[in-house]
Amino acid sequence: MRKFIPFIVVILLLIGAVAFFVLHRSAGTFEKMEDAFAVPDQNRISKVILTDTEKKRVELTKVNGVWMVNGKFPARQELLVTLMEVITHMKTLCPVPRAAHDNVVRWIFERNIKVEVFTAKDEPAKVVYYVGGPTTDGTGTYMLREVDGKPDSRPYITYLPGLHGYLTPRYQTDAEIWRPKEIFKYTPDDIKSLSLEYPAEENKSFSLNRVAKDSFLLAAKDDKYSIHQTYQQKYILQYLAFYSSISMEAYDNKNVAKDSIEHTIPYCTFTITANDNSVNKVNLFYQPVNKRSKMPFDAKGKPMTYDADHFYAALNNNSDFAIVQFYVFGKLLRSYQDFFFKPGTAVVSR
């Protein structure tokens, strides 16, 4: 028996060595895979391309420190922040269990968003992966890496620490969603002149033209409506301050009635000329009552003709069509008379 002791010791040592190797290799592999989809340093990211299975594509490129969408317009900051958060901080929870592997791979290839993250020249060219749908409990996201131009052999479940939900909605492939929603963003000092015209109520129309740093000339659209009193500069400056942040509810460029609506007489027209002589012209149109309208009837129970809460807006030289809220634009809908007396709440004729 004693002569077998050395062999037993050797066998035990081999078993221990194999166990150590397997355990540490597995731990190391998992630790490596934990950050396999993430690009930790956002400052090194120079471009992100998102492409879905419906061929919608968004290319985000950093140009002089500004992230541009398809080379046409700056990206919406809030969407950029949420996308970069997941790109840089997401973690891998575990590989997809073998029993679900085939189904998950099929789901990913049927419907996915391909993500390509490009880094600076001194870094690997890009990280590529496919984003699928949520796990059954909705807290994880199926993803599949691309390695050397080919899909990896194993999909993984990913998550964002601190987020109770899946990540797919953060990868938006509709370029229009990425467009900034701001229509007016001016301080009073930015404005050279402003006019607001009401075609159906000319007595309310007015223009403001800068004559000094904190002084504007107020004029009625037609001299016959002029009020021969001293108007209030403080009311003008308070009014111009409203233009610091005015945004739309949503773009509506696919509206089939867009062209016909734009050929009707607008409810009102804003024309702002900035100090750099750029001109921003926006037409507001009544929006007919529709299934989204919250007030289809007036106080007497009669059907409303127009939506009380929304307008249509034509902007960017009529190249864009949008939905705007009366709640947001109402404070801008002042009349010529308001600058002589204490401004009240705008009342829009319907």
Image (cartoon, rainbow, N blue to C red):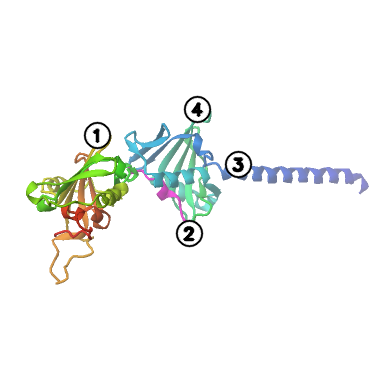
The spot of residue 308 in percent (x, y) is 20, 61
The spot of residue 259 in percent (x, y) is 14, 45
Mark before the other along the chain sequence, 4 or 2 = 4
**In-front residue for pair 283/263:** 283
Task: Please name which of the two marks, 3 or 1, marks the residue nearer to the observer.
Answer: 1
Is residue 137 at least partly visible in the picture?
yes
Residue 61 position (above or below residue 294):
above
Q: Label 3 belongs to which residue? A: 32
Q: Amino acid at mark 3?
A: Lys
Q: Label 4 belongs to which residue? A: 121
Distance from disc 3 to disc 1, alpha carbons, whole Å, reads: 55 Å
Label disc, if present, on residue 277 of the rendered structure: 1
Mark before the other along the chain sequence, 2 or 3 = 3
The spot of residue 260 in percent (x, y) is 12, 47
**In-front residue for pair 197/102:** 197
**Image point (65%, 43%), residue name:** 28
Mark before the other along the chain sequence, 1 or 4 = 4
The spot of residue 219 in percent (x, y) is 15, 46
Q: Residue furthest bottom?
A: 300
Q: Amino acid at mark 4?
A: Lys
Q: Is residue 32 left or right of residue 223?
A: right
The range drawn in magenta is 165-174
**Image point (32%, 48%), residue name:** 245
